[in-house]
C-alpha cells in the first residue's frame, strides 16, 4: 500500500489524501505516506456533510460537501447499471395531483383491495391496440386464483370514478361496463402494490430534500447480459447529496426475506452511508421491527401512513446516524 501511494505521489505536483473510509490497512498506509511525504490529509463526516482537517489540511476544515449524486450515479459507482422498470418516470409528473386521492381510496378499501385488483386483472387484459380512454365490459363475477370468484365492487369503483380514474361506470344485472382514463392508470389498477409505491414516491418529492427520486428502479448488479444478468427491483430510490435512500413498499406483512433483501441491496449499491426504509400498509410485528433494527432499516407502518406523517419521517431519517452494518 505504501509503495503504491509513493508511486502515485511521485508523478503529481500536488497530492492530498481523503481518508473518508477504507480498510485498516489502507488507512494505515495513507497515514504513513501522509507523514512521510508531508502530504495533507482530510476526512469527511457523513453526519455533518462536512470535511475536516486531519493533517496539514486546514483548507478542508469545516468545508461543506457540495457533491450531489443521482440514483444512477450510486448504481454505477457500485459497478451496476439502471434499467427501465414497471413505471416510466418521465410521465409520473402529470399524475402527481392524483396520487393522494388514489391513496385515500386505497386506505378506505384496503381490506378488499387485493380482490379488486384481481378482478381488474381478469376483466381488463391489455392489448397493443387499446385506444384511450380504455373501454371495458364484462361480467361482474370473475374467476380468481384457485377457483375462487372475485366480484366487481361498486362502491370502490364509484370512488375511483369520483377521482377521475374511471368513467361511465354502469352496472346492469350481472354485467359491468366502464372506461379507464388511460393505459398507465390501468396498469396501476392491475398491480396491488402500485398505489403505495406512488404515494411513497410523491412523499419523497414533497419532502423537498432529495435531488433525485426514482420509482420502480431495476438494478442490474454487474451490467451483464443474457443468462448471467442478476437484477433486482427496488420500489423507490432517492438521493440526497452523497446519501442514497432505498425504500421497499409492502401492502402485506413485513417478512424477514424482504428485510434481508433490502439490507443487501442498500449495502451493495449505497455503501455504509446509505439509508434503508421499509413501508408497510399493515401493522408491523414486534419480530419484524426487531429484525429491521438489527439491519439498520427504519419501519414506517400503517399508523404513520394513515396519519399522513411519512414526509416528516423521511426528513428525520435522512438526518439520522448511518445504519448499522449487516450482521
Image (tube, grey):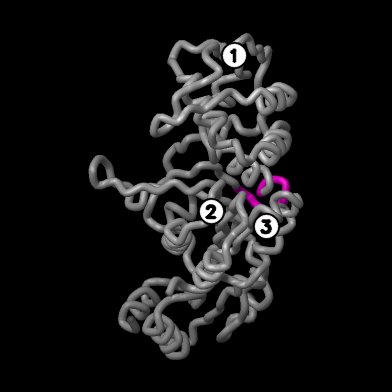
Mark sitting on residue 279 = none
| Residue 279: image location, x then y, percent | 59, 53
Whether residue 163 is visible here, answered yes or no, is yes
* Count of numbered circles in the view: 3
| Residue 137: image location, x then y, percent | 54, 11
| Mark sitting earlier along the chain (1/2) | 1
Does 141 lie within the magenta span?
A: no
Does 208 lie within the magenta span?
A: yes
Q: Which span of residues is magenta-colored?
A: 204-212
Q: Residue at x 55, y 18 (%)?
A: 140
| Residue 84: image location, x then y, percent | 45, 37
Q: Is residue 219 above or below residue 159?
A: below
Q: Residue at x 58, y 71 (%)?
A: 322
Q: Which residue is mark 2?
A: 253
- The picture quadrant where one finds residue 33 is bottom left
Q: Which residue is mark 3?
A: 314
Secondary structure beneath dot 2 equals: loop
Amino acid at each position: 500500500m505504501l509503495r503504491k501511494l509513493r508511486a502515485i505521489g511521485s508523478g503529481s505536483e500536488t497530492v492530498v489524501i481523503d481518508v473518508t473510509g477504507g480498510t485498516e490497512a489502507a488507512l494505515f498506509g495513507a497515514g504513513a505516506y501522509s507523514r512521510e511525504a508531508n502530504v495533507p490529509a482530510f476526512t469527511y463526516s457523513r453526519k455533518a456533510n462536512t470535511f475536516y482537517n486531519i493533517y496539514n489540511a486546514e483548507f478542508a476544515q469545516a468545508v461543506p460537501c457540495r457533491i450531489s449524486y443521482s440514483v444512477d450515479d450510486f448504481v454505477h459507482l457500485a459497478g451496476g447499471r439502471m434499467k427501465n422498470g414497471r413505471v416510466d418516470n418521465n410521465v409520473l409528473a402529470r399524475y402527481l395531483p392524483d396520487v393522494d386521492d388514489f391513496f385515500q381510496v386505497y386506505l378506505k378499501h384496503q381490506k378488499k383491495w387485493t380482490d379488486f385488483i384481481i378482478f381488474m386483472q381478469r376483466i381488463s387484459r391489455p392489448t397493443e391496440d387499446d385506444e384511450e380512454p380504455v373501454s371495458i365490459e364484462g361480467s361482474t363475477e370473475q374467476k380468481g386464483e384457485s377457483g375462487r370468484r372475485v366480484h366487481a365492487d361498486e362502491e370502490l369503483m364509484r370512488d375511483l370514478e369520483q377521482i377521475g380514474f374511471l368513467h361511465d361506470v354502469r352496472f346492469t344485472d350481472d354485467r359491468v361496463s366502464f372506461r379507464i382514463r388511460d393505459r398507465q392508470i390501468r396498469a396501476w389498477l392491475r398491480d396491488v402494490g402500485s398505489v403505495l409505491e406512488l404515494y411513497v414516491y410523491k412523499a419523497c418529492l414533497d419532502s423537498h430534500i432529495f435531488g433525485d427520486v426514482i420509482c420502480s428502479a431495476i438494478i442490474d448488479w454487474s451490467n451483464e447480459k443474457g443468462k448471467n444478468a442478476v437484477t433486482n427491483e427496488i420500489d423507490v430510490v432517492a438521493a440526497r447529496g452523497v446519501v442514497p435512500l432505498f425504500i421497499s413498499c409492502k401492502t402485506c406483512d413485513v417478512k424477514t426475506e424482504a428485510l434481508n433483501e433490502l439490507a443487501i441491496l442498500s449495502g451493495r449499491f449505497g455503501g455504509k452511508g446509505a439509508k434503508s426504509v421499509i413501508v408497510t400498509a399493515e401493522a408491523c410485528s414486534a419480530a419484524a421491527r426487531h429484525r429491521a433494527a438489527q439491519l439498520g432499516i427504519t419501519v414506517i407502518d400503517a399508523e404513520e401512513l394513515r396519519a399522513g406523517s411519512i414526509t416528516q419521517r423521511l426528513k428525520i431519517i435522512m438526518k439520522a446516524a448511518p445504519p448499522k452494518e449487516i450482521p
